[in-house]
Amino acid sequence: MLQALIQKIAGMEDVVVPTLFKPGQFNIIKKLSLGKKLNENEKRYLRGKMKNKLMILTKFMTDMLEEEQDYKFFLAHLGSYYITGFEALKYNGFGWYFKTKIIEIINTKLEGKVIISGKTLKIIRAKSIRNSKFSIDKKTGLKYATNEQILKDIKITKNKYAEIVCRQMLSRYEKLFIKNYNKFQIFKQKPRIVDYVKYGV
């Protein structure tokens, strides 16, 4: 697991330097990822605070993989489904800062809630998902709604907060958020009209 983490970090220099690791520390990670030997000074670095950072990141990575395995096992038995809402938004590269406590799943069999690895899966039944737009993650096999589909699903999920966030992102990112942007302009967040007379202007 640690080696897998080191390989991953080594390919994310722009993200982790200097936020998580100093340039000198990152050079050690690069050497480790290439299987090169460390000198005594580098080994000393690795035994210090840098080791603690790697241990914490390994723990996060392990926990995430365990959760993912639990989801995969459950969803594999669910059959026809896809993940929507904030979890799908995060997968699509938007709202990555949200920590989703409730994962919304559209399917054709079950209705209700299930708690797996401390997260609540809200399972919403639909008559059909044949025309729904989603993508399949090649690594995990999990199915995630497109941004366009997330907006459509709000009618079923009734998640008002997700609707507000999607409207904001549609207004901000437009075609980057949804390819068929022209069809979804009705969802755009309406500009707020401020009556400056009220404020004595």
Image: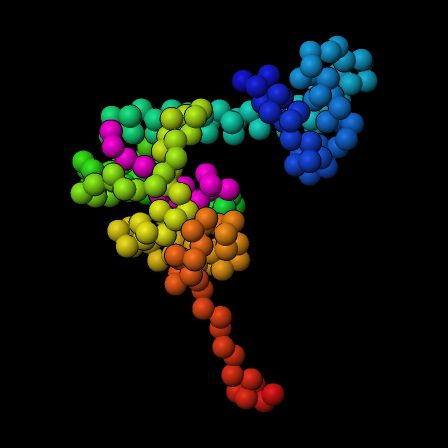
Color theme of the render: rainbow
Q: Is residue 28 above or below residue 189?
A: above
In percent of the image, x 58 and y 22: which residue is there? 5
In percent of the image, x 18 and y 43: which residue is there? 127
Question: In the shown orientation, is residue 69 left or right of residue 50?
Answer: left
Q: Give residue 164's position: percent from left, percent from top.
A: 41, 59
Q: Give residue 191's position: percent from left, percent from top.
A: 49, 70
**Residue 167 part of the magenta-drawn span:** no
Q: Is residue 179 above or below residue 118?
A: below
Residue 112 appears in the figure: no
Residue 97 appears in the figure: yes
Q: Which residues are magenta?
A: 79-93
In percent of the image, x 24 and y 30: which residue is there? 78
Q: Is residue 94 above or below residue 199?
A: above
In percent of the image, x 46 and y 38: which residue is there? 91
Q: Give residue 171's position: percent from left, percent from top.
A: 49, 60
Hey, which quadrant is residue 121 in on the image? top left
Q: Nearer the viewer, residue 118 or 187?
A: 187
